Each structure stands twice: as structure tokens, then as C-alpha cells.
Amino acid sequence: MSVAEREPFWLEVVHSTFSALKFRNYRLWFIGQLVSLFGTWMQVSAQGFLVFELTGSSAYLGYVAFAAGLPTWLFMLWGGVVADRVPRRLLLMITQSALMLLAAILALLTFLDLVQPWHILVLAACAGAAGAFDAPARLAFVLEMVDREEMTNAIALNSTMFNTATTLGPAVAGVVYAAAGPEWCFLANAVSYLAVLAALAMMRLDGRRAGPLPSPEGGAEPVPMHRPSALADMKEGLVFVASDRTVRFLILLVVVMSLFGVSFVTLMPAWASRVLHGDATTNGFLQSARGIGALGGALFLAWLGRRAARGRMILRAVFLMPAAVLAFSFVRWLPVSLLFLAVAGVGLIVALNATNSLLQTLAPDTLRGRVMSVYTLAFFGFVPLGGLMIGTLAESWSEPAAVAFNAGLSLAFAAAAPFVVPHIGRLR
């Protein structure tokens, strides 16, 4: 193509940033998930503030986070096995329907003015169980919708829609909560699941799955007549993760971010009320600020695509996030607080997206669901433990002290990582 024929730079940026949307199935997924996640984040924001209103306890916020995460430990690895054994679209339709039902139950209890803190604990645990089977299938489903060359872009766009919802959902939830009550936020979430269910039903899948790897002689590895047990399948995935040095470090990185880096989010309702002396709307702004930064980070990563050295980005992002959270812990003025939360959002999403993409590249096709279940366990399993820990620390010390302590631990890990695993920075 000559210089005269070359498309304008801004059009090149748009095409490279949204290249995965050329696939019809992925377009359906993107739209359906965007609507559904918008409802999800309305519920997350409203539910946290409702718990704090009902209990007045930072520790109870941690209990709810722990209840939501406990099923991750019990079922996530099994979820990865199931995601490698059954049609992922069918599995996603089942899990999304279960999550819709749970949101509807919470909405009904709140409309009837019957909701109690223990109701929220139980429903959070049930949602966590559904999510344990949903998450590995959702991550591994990407390669059924796009070509392998567009995987990094599709993963980044997944985060774009996630963080668009993270940005807008809590802000709208704060306004709706203050004007009409949390029950309308929960109802909106229940209805929003219809969008992703419709998208899944409308997809035309060609049977392409992350199947057997090519053998050295050409062709595919033979499929065994008798499949091993689910336990043997799970062990195979764990052995791969434990034996590969790079994969092992990437999983450890996610664990540290989840346990110490992301846990501050649990305290946002208490932070809005006690530290910034605000209300449900303030809580929505805090949640949305992190989402705005994460959205910007996801779009940036989508634009870079295959041109970026993902390992170097991970090392920089995993340092940026806790540095911003540490600065946030000392601020008491809302506009500056929102700025630091946005920067933290950039660091978090770039680190997680690049790690996700690298893991999917490094994992054999036949193990992808199981490897992604370990990744998901590392994130969703340790976030509630971090939430329980920071909630307890906040109750004993103070919210700012607890946030600063966890951010400092994350920062120490980030500073040490380039020296402990120097080859990570060279990975593309």
C-alpha cells in the first residue's frame, strides 16, 4: 500500500484497537456482556453499601467478600475440568441463568423489606459457586469466537467492556440507590442477564474449540478412547502450572495482587462514609474512578495488541498499581482520591490482562480451561481472603492504615520481581 493509499492514523488506531469485533460471534458476546456487566456492577456497588448500612461494620464487608470467594476454593478447579469437557456455550448459559435467579431473589427480598445481612452472605456464596464454573469457561471461550491471532485483542476488549461497566455501573447505582433504593439496582442486574443469554443463543459456532495440539509429525494428537477421570484431568493441569517456571511466577503475581493489591476495594463503602464523610453517591464515584482508569488501560492494551512486550508491561503495571493505592491511602480530598484510584485501575487492568494473555499463549490447547481455572482461582480465590484480612485490619486499626499496609506489601513484591525473575521482562 502506497503512502497515498494508507488509511489515516486515527483509523488505523480504531481498527487495531477493535479488531476482534470483526467476528460476529464476538460482537454478540461483547454487546451482551457489556449490558450484563453493567447490571453486575450496579449490584456490587449497591450491595456493599447496603451491607454497611445494615451492619455499620467494615469487618462485615470482609465477611461478604469471603463468602463470595469461598466457593472459588471449593469448585474453581473442577470448573476448569468441566470447561474442558463440555460445550462452553451450554455451560455459560447455565451459570448465567443461575446468577440471574440469585439477583432476582435479592431484589425480591429487598423490595419486600425482608433482607438481612445473612441473606446477602448466603446469596453471595451461591453466586460465588456459579461463578466458579462460569469464569474458566468464559475465559477459555474466547478462542471459540476469534482467531488465535486476535486473542490478545479480544482479551483486552473483554476488559474494556468489563471496565466500561465498572465505570458507569457504580455511578448509576449510587444515584439510583439514593433516589429509589438498592432493590432497583438488584432488579436491573437480574434483567441484564437476558442480554448475554440472548447473545449466546444467537451465536453460530462452527465447532472450533481449543482442541488437540498438532503433533510433531503433523496432524493432531489422537483422542484417547477412554478419558481419564476428572481428578486426573485436574492433576494434569496443576502439574503443568507447578512445573513451568514462567507460568508459576505469573500465577504467584496474580495471588499477590489479589491478596494485597485489590483488597482495598472491599473498604470503599466504609471509606466513602467514614474517611470522606460521603454517602452512597460518593461510594459510586470511588468505584467508578477505578473503572475509568481500568477502561483506559484496557483500551491502551487493545491498541498495542501484539506489538507490546507483555512481560515488561506486567512488571511496570504491577508496580504502578500499589504505588497509586498507597498514595490514595493518605488523601482526604475526593477529586485527588478519584485521580489515584484511576491510576490504580490502569495498573491493575494492564497487569491482569497481559498476564491472562501470556498464560493463554503458554498453555497447551488441551489444558487451557484448566490453566485458566488456576488463574481464576488465584484471582477470585485470594481476593475474598484479602477482603477478610483488610476488613479485620480496618476494624482494629483504621481504614487508611489497613490500605497503606497492604499497598506497601504489594509494592515490595513489585520491586523485587525484576530481580527474582529477570526473564519475565523479555516475554512478548
Image: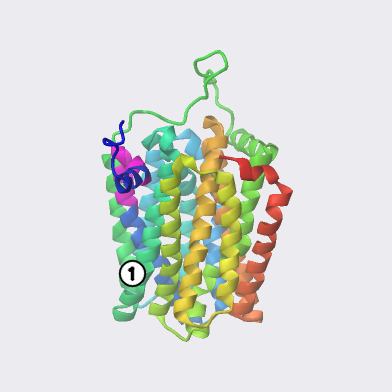
State the residue in front, 43 or 127.
Answer: 43
Residue visible at 60% across and 78% down? 400
Give the extent of the magenta segment: 17-33
Mainly helix, strand or loop, the magenta region? Answer: helix
Q: Amino acid at mark 1?
A: Cys
Say which quarter of the image contains residue 258.
bottom right
Report x, y in % for residue 302: 42, 47
State the residue in front, 242 or 318.
Answer: 318
Quarter of the image with the N terminus in it = top left
Report x, y in % for residue 388: 60, 68
Coloured how? rainbow
Query: Left or right of 375: which side holds 305?
Result: left
Task: Tell which residue pokes out farthest to the bottom in this image.
Answer: 277
Verify whether residue 26 appears in magenta.
yes
Residue 102 seen by the camera:
no
Q: Is residue 112 above or below residue 13?
A: below
Residue visible at 33% across and 80% down? 178
* Count of number-bearing discs: 1
Q: Badge 1: how crowded within 10 Å, few (<14), some, or many (20+)?
A: many
Q: Secondary structure at mark 1?
A: helix
Say which quarter of the image contains residue 175.
bottom left
Residue 124 seen by the camera:
yes
Instruction: Residue under label 1, please give it.
Output: 185
Report x, y in % for residue 93: 36, 45
Report x, y in % for residue 336: 48, 77
Query: Left or right of 94: which side holds 399?
Result: right
Quarter of the image with the C terminus in it = top right
Residue visible at 54% across and 80% down? 331
Verify whether residue 330 appears in magenta.
no
Query: Left or right of 170: which side holds 226?
Result: right
